[in-house]
Amino acid sequence: MNMNEMLSSAREERKQAQNEIIKLEERLKQLLTQSDKRTSLISQVENLEHEHEACCDKLDLLHKNEDYAMGNLSWKFALTPQEMEILHVKRGWICYYWELAAKYGYKDAEAKHDHWKNLCLQYDSNVVVCAGEATSGKILNLDYVFYDALLGGDDDVGSSPVLDLNNVETEFIDSMDEVEMGMGELAIRKVEDFVAEKLGYPEKRSTDLGFPLSEEDQEVFEYIKLRQAWLIYFWGRAKAYALVNNAGVRLKFWKEEMEKFIDKPSRTCAMTVKQGLLQLRKLGIECKLWNALRDRSQGIIYRKDEWEDGQTS
């Protein structure tokens, strides 16, 4: 190979080398660019991860606050043992009247009785008598469990429940709303008047009940006894919460009335009881008791008259 050929070959090789260098430089630039992108992506991912962790922490905090708020709200709307007791006493009253109304053929009374009986305690309407007897300290019916502390026969029945509701599932304020509607339905449909008529208007007769009691007299006996127990129970609660000044006097009076009636059953007691029930309602004892319980036990006041207004507005 002569000198010219060698130079030509060298130039060609240099040119190729330069081209390779150019390609390598371009490749290096591409790699550097990709590396920058990768670094940028990694940085973005890391930032997103931090943001995700912050969001999770915030969400956990919100859930805790929500759980606390819902728990607090449930606590405010859950019925206390004292309120639960009133709930079941009133259910027993409603159940009793629908039971007798069904017996004497009142329209759709049987379905009403079934509904309320399913909501009542095991002893349905008997719970009213049990509550009254426990409040009076005279346990005349022993098939119900009471708090031992209240069975000493003392005139001072405290604010603790007189019925043992430890194994009864807690209910909420809407259950009491339903009960008040049930009590209202009894009044609107004059179910109590219907029952009194079918029992021969005991309030208008002054004869003694026969002994031993006939089936008819037994029904009248239970009718009067239940209404007396209702009065004793609510006057006992009124005394415990100091709702009216003379609650203790009223409680003592009705306890003595029940004792006299048990000793010598007479229809004369029926008129006295009717007047007592009218007075109890006129004084608004049931409503005052409910408001007192809400005020004392819930922290935030959901007064009965306020949420009833909310229902009608």
Image: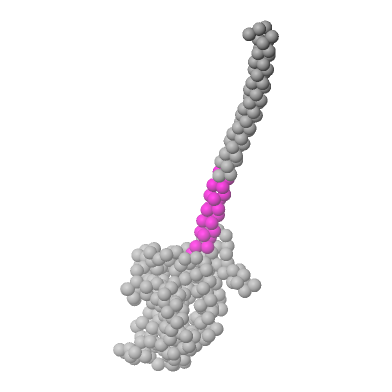
Position of residue 81 measured from the top left corner of the image (x, y, whole percent): 45, 64
Residue 236 visible? The answer is no
Main secondary structure found in the magenta portion:
helix
Q: Hey, which quadrant is residue 133 in on the image?
A: bottom left
Q: In this view, does 42 lie above or below 21?
A: below
State the residue at coordinates (38%, 64%): 167
**Quarter of the image containing the C terminus?**
bottom right
Position of residue 106 measured from the top left corner of the image (x, y, whole percent): 46, 88
**Front residue (pair 313, 141):** 313
Residue that extends furthest to the front in the rendered view of this protein: 1
Q: Hey, which quadrant is residue 111 in on the image?
A: bottom left
State the residue at coordinates (63%, 8%): 1
Let me know if residue 32 is in the magenta part: no
Position of residue 266 measured from the top left corner of the image (x, y, whole percent): 39, 88
Say left or right for 288 vs 102: right
Total numbered badges shown on the rendered structure: 0
Q: Is residue 142 above or below residue 60?
A: below
State the residue at coordinates (50%, 74%): 179
**Front residue (pair 201, 36):** 36
Residue that extends furthest to the left in the rendered view of this protein: 212
**Front residue (pair 251, 24):** 24
Q: Please provide the residue range marked out in magenta.
A: 57-79
Position of residue 161 measured from the top left corner of the image (x, y, whole percent): 43, 66
Residue 38 visible? The answer is yes
State the residue at coordinates (63%, 22%): 24
Q: Hey, which quadrant is residue 91 in on the image?
A: bottom left
